[in-house]
Image (cartoon, helix red, strand yellow):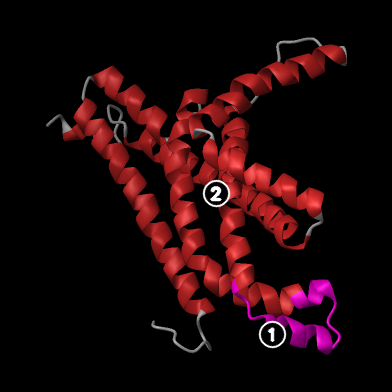
Amino acid sequence: MGDIGLLGFGPDGWGLVLFRAGLMTLAVSVAAFLCGLVLGTLVAWARVGGNRVMRALAEAYTVVLRGVPDILVIYLFYFGGRQVVAAIGTALGFAGPFDISGFVAGMLAIGLISGASQSEVLRGAYQAVPRGTIEAGRVVGMGRFTLFRRVIAPQAMVTALPAMGNQWQSVIKESALVSVTGLVETMRQVSVAAGTTQEHFLFYAAGAVIYLIITTLSDQVFRLAERRSLRGHQGAGY
């Protein structure tokens, strides 16, 4: 079953580097999720309130990003992104070499992928807000921003939170694909450790535990947020 001492934090253990890799996984996941949230919000808004062209572009974005393999999007941003940066840098007269950060490429790629799914969640949450509530806000003279901030967003958040928790869990798992860029996150580090020590079962099991810790703690955070959002709502089963 392997030497469990290899997971320690001593001079011969891999515990510290695995811990740092877990923090990197968390960092790239948070950045990608927030990026996806911004994109998802804009796309959802375009689909429910934009003109015909904006709705068509938003729908095309969701169809393409939900239909293309995630690893292909990451390759496109990392390897294709380096070519784009090099072409722009050369055109502007800068000397190479040109590169793109694995963290940035992975964050943008996963954020773009997550944004497509988050937009569907947010659009559904908006459509679940009672039309009468929105009309009442307009009748009393609320502007669009005030109506969104005080009426639509609080009610839509109650509906969206459980599904957004699922989207967050998906982002964490998709972050493992960023290892192809060379970024030293959990998947990359356990692969290096397993190859170096030949203790494949031990380190891949340790990687699974790291992901489980992150997802379990995250689930508790989202459950707490759900309970808080349901305060004052009828039928809150918490």
Give 136 or 60, whichever is nearer the viewer.
60
Kind of residue sitting beneath label 1: Thr
Horizontal side, residue 217 vs residue 167: left or right: left
The residue at the point 38 percent across, 53 percent down is 215
User: Which image quarter: residue 207?
Assistant: top left
Secondary structure under tag 1 reads helix
- Residue under numbered circle 1: 133
Compare marks 1 and 2 and give the one earlier in the sequence. 2
Residue 16, horizontal then vertical, whole percent = 37, 36
Residue 92, placed above or below residue 128: above
Q: How many marks?
A: 2
Residue 4, horizontal then vertical, whole percent = 18, 35
Classed neighbour count for the residue bearing mark 1: other residues with Cα under 10 Å, few (<14), some (14–19), many (≥20)? some
- Marks 1 and 2: which is nearer the front? 1
Residue 206, horizontal then vertical, whole percent = 27, 38
Identify the image quadrant of the C terminus: bottom left
The residue at the point 40 percent across, 35 percent down is 186
The furthest residue to the left: 1
Residue 31 magenta-highlighted? no
Residue 181 seen in the figure: yes
The overriding secondary structure of the stretch rendered in magenta is helix
